Image (spheres, rainbow, N blue to C red):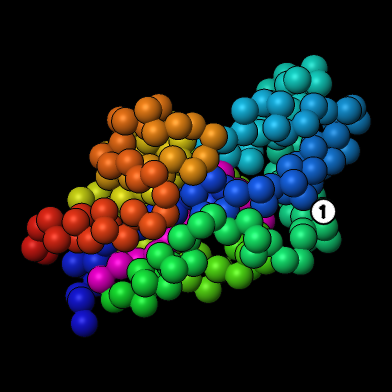
Amino acid sequence: MTADNQRLLILWDVDGTLVRGAADAHGRALEIATAEAIGAEVPAVQSIDPGGRTDREIVRILAAEAGVEADDFAPHADGVITRAVEIYGATVEPDLSGCVLPGVEAMLAELAPRDDLIMGLLTGNIDRVAALKLGSAGIAHHFDFASGAFGSDHEDRTRLPQLARFRAARGDGEWPRGRTVVIGDTTRDIACARADRVGVICVATGPQPADDLVEADAVASHAGELAAIIEQLVVRLPSA
């Protein structure tokens, strides 16, 4: 069995990386919760380039588009997040298995049982939304939700990798940067990884083409290529 301090912490993004087309009810929940809080109509989430943004950032932008300044919205932010979870819980599609991207299920089935990997999450989704969404998609059981960070934790995505590493360490400092990699599908995933000086792999299955993702350490065209890239990382890991 691999010692804890020799494992690779993988922080997976959700939308565009693991699933696609699973954000309809999620987006509506954010829109409704924000509109209720500010008493005004808000634009559709898809109109504000949501890829790679946190849900806290999205609802602030929705409010701003409706004419509410950030300082005025701040007292409402926590309540909007809580209300969005309530709405999503009542409206999430019961079966999102058709939204799982090609190759993802086979890849997760190969990687998740390995004792040299920790399958965490780093997503702009609210934590409970991520759990419901991945549960409906049938793949939630592959992930350690306690080793991750979410859009409910902080608006600034660049703050999330360090928080995920702290949680993964289970109270023993922070998980080493050299044994951490973010996997996502946007330049915002790259930026958050670079901000915390951890590795980053991108897969070109989201809103941005591979040519936009070249600043990542590696770029896969689809999920089927990720296992081999991850294996190369594991092989190159330094001894603890």
Residue at point 74% right, 42% down? 27
Give the percent coordinates (x, y) of residue 142.
Answer: 47, 71
Q: Residues within 10 Å of mark 1 (few under 14, many from 20)?
A: some
> Residue 37 placed where, x, y %?
84, 36
| Residue 229 place in picture, x, y as percent | 26, 53
Q: Is residue 27 above or below residue 88?
A: above
Q: Quadrant of residue 147?
A: bottom left
Q: Is residue 59 left or right of residue 147?
A: right
Q: Where, quadrant-wise, is the N terminus in this rendering?
A: bottom left
User: Furthest-bottom residue in view?
Assistant: 1
The answer, for residue 140, to whether it is visible in the render is yes
Which is more toward the observer, 25 or 211?
Answer: 211
Is 126 a magenta residue? Answer: yes
**Residue beneath the point at 61% across and 70% down:** 138
The foreground one among 179 and 70 is 179
The residue under the point 45% across, 32% down is 209
SS for callout 1: helix
- Whether residue 74 is visible here, answered yes or no, is no
Q: Is residue 106 left or right of residue 84?
A: left
Is residue 12 found left or right of 174 in the rendered image? right
Q: Is residue 12 left or right of residue 81?
A: left
Q: Is residue 82 above or below residue 168?
A: above
Answer with the quarter of the image where residue 16 lies. Answer: top right
Residue wearing tag 1: 87
Q: What is the span of residues highlighted in magenta in the rendered image?
A: 116-129
Residue at 8% across, 63% down: 239
Is residue 194 located in the magenta-colored stretch of the structure? no
Q: Residue 9 location in percent, x, y?
A: 32, 60
Q: What's the residue type where badge 1 is placed?
A: Ile
